[in-house]
Image (tube, coloured by chain):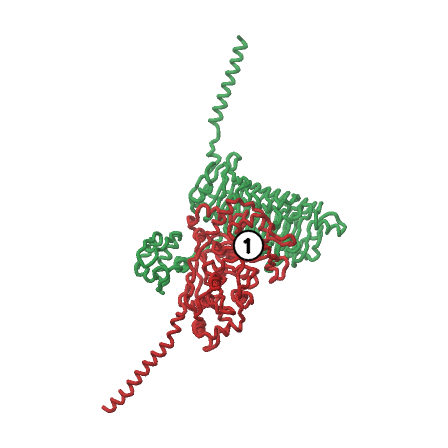
Chain colours: A red, B green
Amino acid sequence: MSKKSTILKWVIPVILMSTLLIILVAAIKVPHTQYVPQLNCDCPPGFKLNDKNECIAQNLYMAYSTNNDPGVGGLKTALPKVRDGFSPQQIDLGRYLFFDPILSGDGTISCASCHDPKKGFSDGLATSIGFKGHQLKRSAPSLWNVAYFKLFFWDGRANSLEEQMQGPLFSKEEMGNTPEKLLKTINSLNNYKHLFAEAFPNKVKEAPISLNDIYTAITAFEASLISLNSKYDRYAHGYHQALNKQEIEGMNIFRSFVARCAECHTPPLFTNQQIAVLGTPEPNGLALDPGAEIPFNDSTLRGGFKVPSLRNIEKTAPYMHSGNFATLKETVQFYTDGRGHAVPKDENLRIHWHIWEPKLTDYELDRLVDFLKTLTDESFMPKVPKVLPSNQAAFINNQNQESIK
Amino acid sequence: MKTKSRLLKIVGYLVLFAIGVLFGKTLLKPQPADTVPMPTTMKYRSVGATNDSLTVTDQNTFSGNIIQIKDGESIQEAVLKANPGDLLRVYPGTYSETVYIDKDNISIQGVIIDGVWPTLDGKKALNDAILYSGNGITVENLKIIEYKGNGIMGQAGNNFIIRNNWIVDTGVYGIFPQYGKNGLISHNILTEIEDAAIYVGMCDNVDVKFNEVYGNVAGIEIENSRHCLVESNLAYNNTGGILAFLTPGLPIKTVFDVIIRNNFISGNNHENFGAPGSIVSGIPPGTGILVMAADDVIIEDNIISNNDNAGITIVDLPTGAPTANDPNSEPNPDRVVILDNFMIENGNNPVGDIKALMLSQLKTKGPDILAMGGGVGSTIRDKNRYRTFGLEHYGPAQITDTKDVTTLMFDKPVAPRSVSKEELGELTYYGVCAGCHAFDTRLIGVPTKLIQAIYKDNPQGIVDYINAPRNLRDDYPEMPPQNYLSDEAKIAVAEYILSLKN
């Protein structure tokens, strides 16, 4: 009897105490789960999860022959090698980082400031606005299908997404951050510590977040932005009713050797990923941008830029490296206005041989624009996070910035 | 009286004669049907041919229906109606249209009656006569004139046959397969083309045989292509006769294994009328063969005569083309092999650089063979018989002939990659459906798990829904029809959805 009562005396308080403790711990943990949900353990659309927890790209172009070098033209042609195999957690973590302004030097700019999903992952500006309102010299390229690209930046100076993102992150004119400051900021946030531990489970426990982890996660997210289900793609896969008569006319002009669009904008990516010297004009009498001449240290590449993909081109006006053309019509008009017509008199550019005088009619230019609009597909649009691990407001774009001012 | 009856007699005879002629004409007139035999197969050209590349004709036997196209009708309309395997027979007449073929195994065959050809006339307003992207395309017996871009252009179509076409002034190129593997271009006649009459661009395994090219800027051009045989062609009065080119800045970076054999390359002295800025616009008139940065080119048994600048010119990229550099294009012609060629009267009137170069040697004539710029491992057989310049580093050829090479095409067509039903289902599910459906979470559409429950053992039910969705749930938006998927893809994805585990 006395034994029983002593047990009760001890057991009851222990049970009471441990319940309280559990409640307390749970209460402490609550803010985490409230602010940031667990990382997604499913792959984004367009990817299949394999048994190694990797997301592998899947699309209908994978059904086609690779006898020709992939990615170089024709309707039923395979795509070039894709950058895939990231885990769903890395992709999801990258999504948070992509929209998080803490990545910039003063916490005001995120990747999405210039690569706004609503604007084809560009920003709608002729040339982007960077750190503290700095006016940049080139337009923000779209990020759709970057998983298939080999060259990055307009002048092709980077060979991987990891290499590319260090440009804007640590440029004084773009995001204004430094590697040291970025690491310090990220490592000071418990939410990010948890999420990185979840996305990189093989790392030593308590090891700080590294720059490479950050690059990998953002690369994983960017490489998940796939757009291959446009009206054009339906036509290419054999459903010929997908395009109307005018769009088909436009497609035939696009791939004819008169307009020669498809020679550099080769399907299915609509870029051959080469550097081409076009001789496009700069806006407002700006000096000629030397382009690829600088990184390649080759004067024959003066005024040369990477051929951009045309997928979702409808969404990314204005056009060309410095946004000189407001509409697609003006852009296609450039190609029929004559070889070198916009090159400053004192320049001797080695204009690409496909730039000539195709003498396209106004009707043909309109049909080309019709066709370009069939390359739009945003069915795999990612979600903008409502809450960020840094507790910042998700993603500040230029418009918001202006309204804040 | 007498004269009158004689006159009547004569008139009577004449009338009788006329009637006789009329009768004869109508009764003895050969029936047109006799001149247009229905083909029992597409193999006719290979009758009596040697066992070489022309056996490619065995590959494209038409297996479908014959569709006839008469004057006033549209070839394109027929193509849109045609199914793979069909043969489109185009009768004499004028067809002003661009014909695009985005299907496999379509043959277009002109029917020539009494010397009258079916003619595609671009009237200098239309861009291309024929554009194809399908595999197994045959185009033959057509006259094609006055287009702005191309006579016949292929984009990534394999196993093509382009033959017996008569192509005049079709703009930039006459015949231009691009990104194609395994093709035959034979027995075509082409003239008045402002770039290359026959342009094999970024292709593999193509034979170019028995063609006549004259009055073009370039006769035949093999560019950034591998394994090409250029044999038994007649190239005369072009600016340049036969070219093997590497062009920088293209996605395919090499040209090698090209045999230029048994061709007649004569009097290619035409003034250069290439478009400003085009690479061929830099070719000097009087160029017989031009090798620019191409590797492993064998030049054998050609008759090369009366080309006023030089018989054979071999240059590297910096010498040959004023284009932007490409760090990924190797700019030198390596391992060129010149075997026995019959060369006379070349270099009689050199121009430009070569003229200056020869003058520096106190010579007024251009050479039979000229090499300029970089390159290693090139060889020549019996160098002493030719007048050469810049061939000091060419060693003696290690081979005497290429007689063992009868074709560089494949003996079987390139097979289209076939994916299994499961793979097609998987590609379609993740590549298309996954935009709105996840296995057990709600995206835009219902979870796949729910679809499985509704359509258990009923893939056809899913196919029917894909074709014509009916909104079954108020809590989800209506699905747009996915009827653009092929029938194979629809059933494959339906079965895949039902087999998904997680």
Q: Residue at x 45, y 63 (%)?
A: A224
Residue ranking furthest to the left: A1
Point out residue B151 in the picture as x, y percentages from the top left corner. Answer: 54, 44
The total of numbered circles placed on residues is 1
Reply above or below: A155 against B149: below
Q: Amino acid at mark 1?
A: Asn
Reply above or below: B220 against A14: above
Q: Residue at x 57, y 53 (%)?
A: B225
Q: Nearer the viewer, residue A285 or A96?
A: A285
Which quadrant is home to the C terminus of chain B?
bottom left
The residue at which mark 1 appears reads as A324
- Chain designation of label 1: A
Point out residue B8 in the picture as x, y percentages from the top left corner. Answer: 51, 13
Q: Residue at x 63, y 43 (%)?
A: B236
Disc 1 packing (10 Å; few <14; some 14–19; many ≥20): many
Point out residue A160 in the picture as x, y percentages from the top left corner. Answer: 53, 64
Q: Residue at x 44, y 66 (%)?
A: A394
Residue ranking furthest to the right: B362
Q: Nearer the viewer, residue A221 or B413?
A: A221
Apparent side of residue A83 relative to residue B447 in the rendered image (left or right): right
Residue A205 visible (yes or no): yes
Point out residue A294 in the picture as x, y percentages from the top left corner. Answer: 61, 61
